[in-house]
Amino acid sequence: MLSVTFPSSRSVALTLAGAGALWGASARPATAAPSPGKTLQSRTDGNLGLGVTLGQPTGLSGKYFLSPQFAVAGAFGWGYQYGGRVHADFAWHPGTAFDHDLVDVVPYVGVGAGLGLFHHQAHPWRRRHPEHDVWNHSHGAMFLRLPVLGAAAHWQDLPLDTFVEFAWAPGVIVGNHGPLFSGWAVDWAIGARWYF
């Protein structure tokens, strides 16, 4: 006859308590992105955020807090106006618009610049009238981002921020037809970053 022996409730409780103690000793609490008026974390804990951005551009996003009020941010990806592109911004966070145990909502304003490289297919009308076609070629571009206007939600229980931002992005496009000023470009994006 098969005999099955179950551990006692005391040994189960001791095992769970020991596992909990080990986990508690090794786990590092989540650190939110710094908010204005709060303490900046150490260099290796909570100041560098890496994530994704969707919109104009779509790609990878990063942000590094120099202090709770000032940060450098950037993105590498693709956008309609400038194609494959990279940009960097300097952002000022003047204060916390909404402060809660769950989340801080932090507006920011900044300035930045970027580089783009794209191949834009012309509208069919322009293909029939090549004298008007300044787009149907590979181009390089240099552009500004000013002002950058955004707001970020700094989640307090996770090392995460979610953000939305807009920027006017005028630029100079350099291609086969010489330099061309583009003043209508607008960047917009939503995204999220995990802080380390």
Image (cartoon, rainbow, N blue to C red):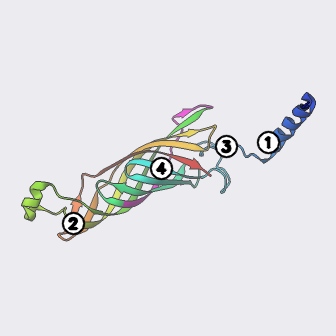
Give the spatial CA distance, label 4 vs label 2.
Answer: 29 Å
Q: CA distance from mark 1 to mark 4?
A: 31 Å
| Cα–Cα gap, marks 2 and 1 | 59 Å
**Residue 8 versus residue 135: which sits nearer the camera?**
8
Going by the numbered disc 4, the residue's amino acid type is Val
Q: Which residue is mark 2?
A: 137
Whether residue 31 sits left or right of residue 140 in the image: it is right
Residues tagged 1 and 4 counted as in contact (Cβ below 8 A): no
Asked where in the image residue 12 lies, by quadrant, the reply is top right
Question: Of callouts 3 and 1, which one flags the residue occurring earlier in the amino acid sequence?
Answer: 1
Q: Specify the amino acid type for callout 3.
A: Ala
Image mark for residue 24: 1
Write the residue at 84% across / 36% down: 16
Give the answer, above or below, for where 151 lies relative to 181: above
- The quadrant where residue 96 appears: top right
Mark 1, Cα crowd under 10 Å, few <14 / some 14-19 / many 20+, is few
Q: Amino acid at mark 1?
A: Gly
Q: Nearer the viewer, mark 2 or mark 3?
A: 2
Q: Are marks 2 and 1 in contact (CB under 8 Å)?
A: no
Query: What number is the disc on residue 52?
Result: 4
What is the number of the mark on residue 30? 3
